[in-house]
Amino acid sequence: MGRERRDRRDRREKVATTLAGAVGEEIGTFLAPVDAELERGYPGDPGTRQPVHTVYVPGDAFAAGTVRSWGDRALAALDRHAPDAASFAAVLGLPDHLAEPVYDRVRAKLEREPVEDLRIDFEDGYGTRPDAEEDEAAARAARLVAEAHARRDGTAAPYTGIRAKCMEAPVRDRGIRTLDIFLTGLMEAGGLPGGLVLTLPKVTYAEQVTAMVRLLEEFEEAHGLDPGRIGFEIQIETSQAVLASDGTATVARMIRAARGRATGLHYGTFDYSACLGVPAAYQASDHPAADHAKAVMQVAAAGTGVRVSDGSTNVLPVGPTPKVHDAWRLHHALVRRALARAYYQGWDMHPGHLPTRYAAVFAFHREGFEQAAARLVAYAGRVGGDVLDEPATAGALGGYLLRGLDCGALDTAEVTRATGLTRADLEGFAVPRRGYPAAPAT
């Protein structure tokens, strides 16, 4: 045995270097500011659940039963226009092997958790009202949200918040006051709930984001909250938000101006399209102008921990069954298209959009489940296969499975059975900072 060890040592390659250790130290010192900037500006995905959609409800229409009402109306639409898996699959063009699993999961989702993210709207969907009326509506919204979270009976969406008016001069004071009333009402009712989300609309300049940060800092200090407790989404609805007059990407400046508070970039389909002069008949989330805006948003947000959301369709699934089916096919196709482009969230404007939102999301995750599981197993175990995946792709595979679990498309037991991996294992691949997934098992 000793002789074999000596033979192996004799066969080892000779290792030689030229550079002195001081050179590496000098380079390390030189790049230290860059290392710090990478750490600060590109922390990677936060690893938390991202809702698959955001539902907008006008402030005066929001009620204690809104979430349950949306689920019941969506179920009623299924009962009327696609009462079984076969008819629903036929409308959407789902393959036979997905018809039952998708339909059953859609119905279960609508019964259990019909809305993942609810935004109570005090902007376009609410309009201009007398100050006293909006004051009362904002206070009422805070009370209802606090009561729903306190009950813990499923009447609160996992994520809930408001969209106040923007930072432009004509409505700035009104927006600030509504935001203040809502947040103060929550604090007086027991504190800010988990899953609180605020949306800042029609942002044009990074300074408007800075102003929002200043407001939230003042609120946190006044109530003794931890700095950075309140985050917000930035809504991209103007051309200036994408491209500044000097040719740079304004949206990247906005993320930096948010100083870690930005949670998402939400594309505003119709305001943005109108801003560019797109005719009303062609304003849609798959228009080339929309694709360009979202691509810029996506690149600016990559690695920052800020997530990107697609917009909505204004074609509502209402009326006779053939018309509902046409609207369902359109919505389903748009959601499926967005998912393939890594826009994992979008807006839904009507309860009738919920069946096709969830159908598209569930089918997207179930149709690729077996292949994604096999590729991740091969990567984790260093087993050969017909695809040679990089560490970054392993992270994407882990993220794909985690999103499927979070929304209900996949079950924990089937994922563990197919991969041999726990949720913690999947998070180890998907979540590490700055896009460096965990190394495969040795």
Image (cartoon, grey):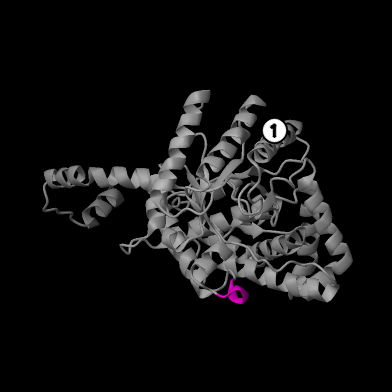
**Residue 390 visible:** no
Q: Main secondary structure of the magenta part?
A: helix
Q: Nearer the viewer, residue 65 or 414?
A: 65
Q: Which residue is mark 1?
A: 146
What residue is at 47 percent from the left and 47 percent from the top? 169
User: Which region of the structure is painted magenta?
Assistant: 279-283
Q: Position of residue 172 (x, y in %)?
A: 50, 44
Q: Residues within 10 Å of mark 1 (few under 14, many from 20)?
A: many
What residue is at 56 percent from the left and 37 percent from the top? 177
Q: Position of residue 73 (x, y in %)?
A: 83, 56
- Is residue 86 highlighted in magenta? no
Relative to 67, say whether 355 is above or below: below
Relative placement, left or right, of 68 versus 227 is right
Q: How many callouts does the rendering have? A: 1
Relative placement, left or right, of 326 versus 274 is right
**Residue 251 visible:** yes
Q: Position of residue 114 (x, y in %)?
A: 75, 51
Q: Nearer the viewer, residue 2 or 51?
A: 51
Q: Quadrant of residue 145?
A: top right
Which amino acid does the dot numbered 1 rest on? Ala
Q: Nearer the viewer, residue 174 or 412?
A: 174
Element carrying mark 1: helix
Q: Quadrant of residue 101?
A: bottom right
Relative to 328, say whether 170 is above or below: above
Q: Position of residue 293 (x, y in %)?
A: 47, 65
